Amino acid sequence: MSDNDHAYFAPSFSDTWVRCNGALSLCHDLHKQGKIDLNETTVYMEQGTWAHDIAAECLRRKITPLNLIGKKFKGEVITAEDARQLNIYYRLCEERMNKPRTKYFIETRVHATDDVWGTADFFSFDSHTLEVIDLKWGKGVVKEVVDNFQEMIYAYAVVRKLQKAGVDIKNIILWIVQPRIPNLPVKKWEVSFEYLYKWVSDHMLNAVLRQKAGDRTITPGPEQCRFCPAAKRGCNRSNEVAHQFFEEFVVRDQDPRILPIEKVIHVLNNEEMILKGIKNIRKYAESVLMKGGEIPGYTMKNGRSNRQWIDESTVEKMLKPHIPESELYSKKMISIAGVESVLGKKHPLMEHINKYVTKPEGKPKLSKDDGSGKKVATIQQHFQNLIENKGE
Ligand code: SF4
């Protein structure tokens, strides 16, 4: 976070430092004390760098990742699945690269301020529209494009530079390509100039100025603590939300119906941290017991398991004379997604097959009200509809 390759206020870490003023200084202190290693890389980070390098290489050479299937890149073989997923990102960038009067940049360092800079995966612009495309290789956490701090910082940095060069950008479009998330690998957000600049001044610049002035206020929350290195060791506050939950809700055994609505929202907003806190306690208790320690009232037992054939082919031979083939074996047609991946979405047959595809409404589920998707009708609305239909 502070060497030549990374700004102190790195956009990739902005989810944390914009929301928690004390996070960066605490992380650096813990690093100096040897409690955490800020230069540590994980296998997921290495995989991400590998995928980004392939994508950048393909864009520079203008060759689709599909041409690299089976080839080795930095010691790893590129599988058909890797190539297919990277191709989603490649195609989106390629479309922009082929647009007339459009300039594009691949893996380019951009500066929002002297202290806030990073490397944008891809951006392109013509005389009035800027598009920033970010590749996310992770699949554990779904990244949203709306209000994505890292993307907003890159967009602001580029707009600032273009304005200085006299380019009058009017439209800003942000994209996130997370190809290993099957349902929605590509997300787009058209953000207004005013919204972007207000966010930069109210949040990003504000956070930088406060921290430079010595503000070290620690503010825990699900977004900022999720990838903060201090959450693992050294920051007690990261568990605060979970502790509050235990204290106020579990320990006093409250009924959700008598909880003030702010508490309900607080728990929902911090659901991930609370569940993580519970998981950590369970893991800790398991490790104590496995090491021979004691937790009164608890012990380790084998969980449920399913019976298995020891030697399936021998049993198969034994059963064949006794059970008709139609009952011995189960046969199931592949799913719609399976057909699409075998035939390809653009296969001529798909047009006819799609006439036999329907998508039932999903079960109502508590969701963030972010303006997207169709809202489920309430019981009162259902009654109202029934009354209105009767009256016709
Ligand atoms: S773990 Fe959370 S509360 Fe602690 S420093 Fe990091 S972001 Fe702030």
Image: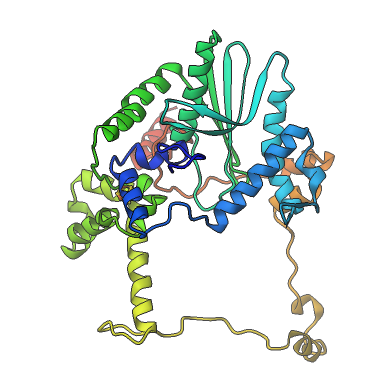
Residue shown at 57% from the left, 20% from the top? 130
Q: Is residue 148 visible?
A: no
Counting from the top left corner in percent of width and height, residue 67 is at: 82, 43
Tell me the quarter of the picture where residue 89 sits: top right
| Relative to 220, 391 lies left or right | right
Task: Please tell me which residue lies in front, 303 or 244.
Answer: 244
Tell me the quarter of the picture where residue 93 sits: top right
| Relative to 18, 185 lies left or right | right
Counting from the top left corner in percent of width and height, residue 312 is at: 74, 85
| Relative to 328, 124 lies left or right | left
Q: Count of labels shown?
A: 0
Q: Is residue 147 visible?
A: yes
Q: How is the image coloured?
A: rainbow
Residue shown at 70% from the left, 43% from the top? 54
Counting from the top left corner in percent of width and height, residue 104 is at: 66, 23
Quadrant in which the N terminus is drawn: top left
Tell me the quarter of the picture where residue 79 sits: bottom right
Residue shown at 51% from the left, 48% from the top? 362
Against 379, residue 247 (above or below) is below
Counting from the top left corner in percent of width and height, residue 36 is at: 39, 57
Residue shown at 79% from the left, 36% from the top? 63
| Relative to 4, 290 lies left or right | left
Against 170, residue 69 (above or below) is below
Against 116, residue 294 (above or below) is below
Task: Please tell me which residue lies in front, 213 or 282.
Answer: 213
Quadrant in which the C terminus is drawn: top left
